Image (cartoon, rainbow, N blue to C red):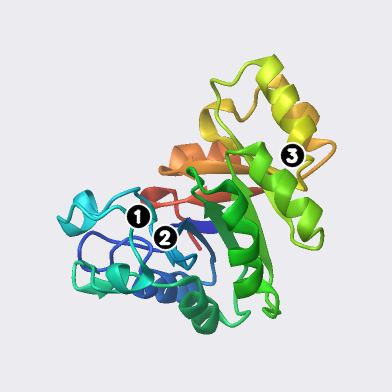
Amino acid sequence: MGFAHRGLHFGSEIPENSLAAFEAAMELGAGIECDLRLTSDDHVVVFHDADARRLCASPLVISQSTRKDVAGLRVAGHPVPTLETVLDLVDGRVPLLFELKVEQDLRRWTPAVARALSHYRGRFGIMSFDPRMLRLLRTARPEFRSGLLLQERRSFVERRMYLRIAKPDFLAVELAAVGQPWVSRALERMPIYAWTVSTARERAQAEVQADALIWEGDGRPRN
C-alpha cells in the first residue's frame, strides 16, 4: 500500500495532515506520511508549511509560536494535530513516516521527538532533507529508523557527502530521480522510497524501481 502523502486528503473536506486524513488512510490500509514542525516551546505539531498563511489564512509562524498558539489554528475547520495525538490515533495500526521540517532548531529536535516516540510501539521511520539532523538522531537514538530525503537535482558530490553524514537506514528519493543509475545502485544496499507519486502512470513506473511509494491523488493504489 505504501504511504499516503500527508494522509489521504481531499480538498477542504479532508485537509492534508489532519486526523481525518489519517483516519481515511487507515481505512484504506495505507501507511501515513506526515510533516512535523517544532514550536517555540518544543512541542511537535503536524503541519507542512513554515507559516499558516496557505492553510489557515493566518500570518502565524509555527517555529515562533507556542503550542497554545498553534492549537488556536484551524485548517478547514480541523485543528492542527500534535505528534502525540497522531500516535494515539494510529496506535500501531499502520506504519508511519515522519518528515522533520528543520529550520534554525536543529539541536532541539532530538529530545522533542524522542520524548513523544520513546514509548510508541508501532512501526515508524523519521526522514529529513538535513543529513545533520539524521546524524544527531542516530547518535542519540540509534534504535529509531531514519531516512534521508534526496532531490533529483543533488549532484554526485552532494549525495555522497549527505550519505556520509547521515548514514541512513533508507532513502526517500524524488520521483524524477527514480530509475537513475545511482538510485539503482543504492537499492542494492538499502530500501528506496519514491515521492510523490500522483498518477497511475507514475505508480506503474515507480513500483518496479522502488520498495515503497509515497503517493497522493490518482497515484493511490487500485485494488
| Front residue of 165 and 196 | 165
Badge 3 marks a residue whose secondary structure is helix
Q: Label 2 is placed on what type of residue?
A: Ser
> Mark 2 or 3 closer to N-term?
2
Please report contact status of discs 2 and 3: CB closer than 8 Å, yes or no.
Answer: no
Q: Label 1 is placed on what type of residue?
A: Gln
**Left or right of residue 91: residue 223:** left
Q: Quadrant of residue 115?
A: bottom right
Mark 1 surroundings within 10 Å by alpha-carbon count, few (fewer than 14), some (14 through 19), many (20 or more): some
Q: Residue 40 shows which numbered tag?
A: 2
Q: Label 3 is placed on what type of residue?
A: Ala
Mark 3 surroundings within 10 Å by alpha-carbon count, few (fewer than 14), some (14 through 19), many (20 or more): many
Percent position of residue 9, x then y: 34, 62
- What residue do we see at 78% from left, 48% from top? 169
Q: Residue 166 shows which numbered tag?
A: 3
Mark 2 surroundings within 10 Å by alpha-carbon count, few (fewer than 14), some (14 through 19), many (20 or more): some
C-alpha distance separating marks 3 and 1: 27 Å
Q: Is residue 166 visible?
A: yes
Q: Residue 64 shows which numbered tag?
A: 1
Q: Quadrant of the N terminus?
A: bottom right
